[in-house]
Amino acid sequence: MGRRPAEAAALLNDMAANLPVLLGRNLVGIYLYGSITHSSFSPQRSDIDCIVVTRQYVSDDQFRRLREWLDGMTKTNPWTTRLQLSFLVKARLLTSSHRSNAKHDCCLYQFGILKRCGSDGNPIIWLDHLRRGKVLVGPPAKSFLPEITEGMLSAALKRELGYLREELTNPESEWREVPMYRAYATLTICRILYTQAKRTVVSKPMATRWVINTFPNCPRKIIEQALRYNETGREVQISFRSLRRFLEFAETEIDIPVK
């Protein structure tokens, strides 16, 4: 597992101790994925990605207590605002809840805010957990996770590219002009291309190096800029035009009609 600062480790310990109390019998387990579980973790930039699986939807009372606890934790541990917690219902794993009457099936804690939301049934995060993840509380995920089919994974990769396109083509987006987001988008496209070819998930740096070696005509400059940002945290100016072209290239590889 990647090197973790003491405050990040303390936060994980606090989660393992307090979420079972806050959620009671509703809690199934707590599952880490992402860079916190492997060597690409960066204390300067990485988030802590975590899935909390529950038996039923989080009740209003549980939601209130979770929000109060998280708000309190932000005052004692600055790593709390770098948590990305997805609260997912066991019976609804790998299924979408974006239908109008289920848009609040799940919860998400991100950027220091807990909110109710729908789920896109993302299998990519579960592939990441199954490969290198860690169980904080509960049984192994493979003991209850439904089969991740080829169709599920292909649909998820297309959705991920769609999310990027929405941000990059929306002139009112608060993110597309942000250097950090452009670096994130570039590395995410690399990982999508890797997962499409290999049907598994690896770290963004590993996927990035694979893309450079596999596609001679890829926009190597912006990929190396994004990788440099990931390694150093120094702001980079990634060309918007080059990023759009890279997105269109990925959409072609994933068999999405380019708009």
Image: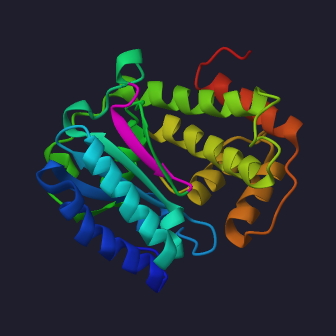
- Viewport quadrant of the N terminus: bottom left
Query: Which residue is pictured at 11% across the width and 52% down the height?
Result: 25
Residue 142 lies in the magenta stretch: no
Q: Residue 48's spot in the image, x, y percent? A: 47, 63
Of residue 212 and residue 245, the one placed in the foreground of this image is: 245
Q: Is residue 202 visible?
A: yes
The quarter holding residue 20 reads bottom left
Task: From this view, report whether residue 117 is shown above or below residue 202.
Answer: above
Query: Which residue is pictured at 54% across the width and 68% down the height?
Result: 40
The quarter holding residue 172 reads top right
Q: Residue 237's spot in the image, x, y percent? A: 88, 54
Q: Is residue 82 left or right of residue 56?
A: right
Residue 105 lies in the magenta stretch: yes
Q: Residue 24's spot in the image, x, y percent? A: 15, 56
Q: Residue 140's spot in the image, x, y percent? A: 18, 55
The magenta stretch is 103-111
Query: Which residue is pictured at 43% across the width and 69% down the height?
Result: 72
